[in-house]
Amino acid sequence: MRVSPTHAIVAVTYRCNARCLMCDIWKKETGAEMAPGDYRRLPRSLKEINVSGGEPLLRRDIADVMEAMREACPGVRLVLSTNGLLPDRLDDLLGRAPGLAVRVSLDGIAELHDEIRGIDGAFEKAMRSIDIAKKHGAADLGVCATMTRHNAGRVREIQALAERMGLQFTFTVAHSSEMFFGEKDAERPSADAAREDIEEIKGRLYASKSVKDWFRAYFTEGLMDVLRGRPRPIRCRAGLDFFYLDPEGKVYPCHLWSRPMGDILEQTYEEIVDSNPEVIEAVSRCTRRCWMTCTVAPEMRRNLPAYAARVAWAKLLHHAGKGRRSI
């Protein structure tokens, strides 16, 4: 099967200096990590790589890792996902690797963020990291929030802060993953607790002049489906358009799928997919109620005209006071 994945999450380390309530990566035993040159084995077709972890800035050679990714995937958009706890290292990286997109995790204002991240002073460091990214002229800069039972009802405060600071804003809800986040269903907010946040955030996004924000509003509506136990509104092509790569080189269809398909250090991505047709088939029939940008965005971009029409219709329904679906 000829495959040309366009998006990937690449965890370059499982080491983490946060103690987040909705993620257990910091509890994982850390093993081997791919060398910078190993990342030249990434498929050339990738258009966007979310460089994640753990905390990627804990790797002293992160700039070399980024350089190898750019060599492997010409023109790729590299998105550094950071918890913002290492502003000085971010300063060094952006000085050596300009042009990165930066997303700083933010789960509340002031003490609430510190509580959820389990680190005193986390909010202050996140703000400093944002200031450093601005100093370096990062044009593609934003904050990402995870809605949990701890901050449901207050995520709109993060969106408002992002608007005041001129930052992009995205959010999701807590997900469980045996091999990544851990079992976190108990951290997920109830639909009732999340409803007002989702309504207000969606409304601000649909009111924006940015078409990108309209797509984000459509995604935000999908989060309510997840919380109410409904099927995801669009199909998932994990393993074909998107994959997850762990620090040791193991390839998964996504980071919620517990069994690896293969090892990028031993096979090309195309060979990995060809040797695992049963996994690709199983993913196509997956009934897991997940809704994350990593699998939603590639499908929408693959058939952009059709989904643009869906988003435009959802926006019209919203302004008519009807909503895309009953929230």
Image (cartoon, helix red, strand yellow):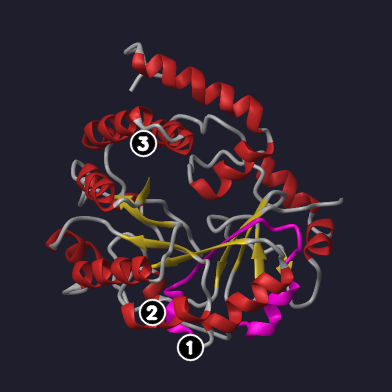
Q: Distance between the Cα atoms at labels 3 and 1?
A: 39 Å
Q: Is residue 50 magenta?
A: yes
Q: Is residue 207 magenta?
A: no
In the drawing, what numbered circle is on residue 133?
Answer: none
- Dot 2 alpha-carbon crowd within 10 angstroms: few under 14, some 14 to 19, many 20 or more: some
- Dot 1 alpha-carbon crowd within 10 angstroms: few under 14, some 14 to 19, many 20 or more: few
Provide the residue designation for mark 1.
60
Provide the residue designation for mark 2.
91
Per the rendered image, the range of residues in magenta is 34-60
Q: Is 175 left, or right, of 76 in this rendering?
A: left
Which quarter of the figure has residue 21? bottom left
What type is the residue that disc 3 sits on? Leu
Residue at image location 36% in from the left, 34% down from the top: 205
What type is the residue that disc 2 sits on? Asp
What type is the residue that disc 1 sits on? Arg
The percent position of residue 301, horizontal first and vertical second, equals 63, 39
Which quarter of the figure has residue 195? top left
Provide the residue designation for mark 3.
227
The answer to whether residue 14 is visible is: yes
- Residue at far left of view: 111
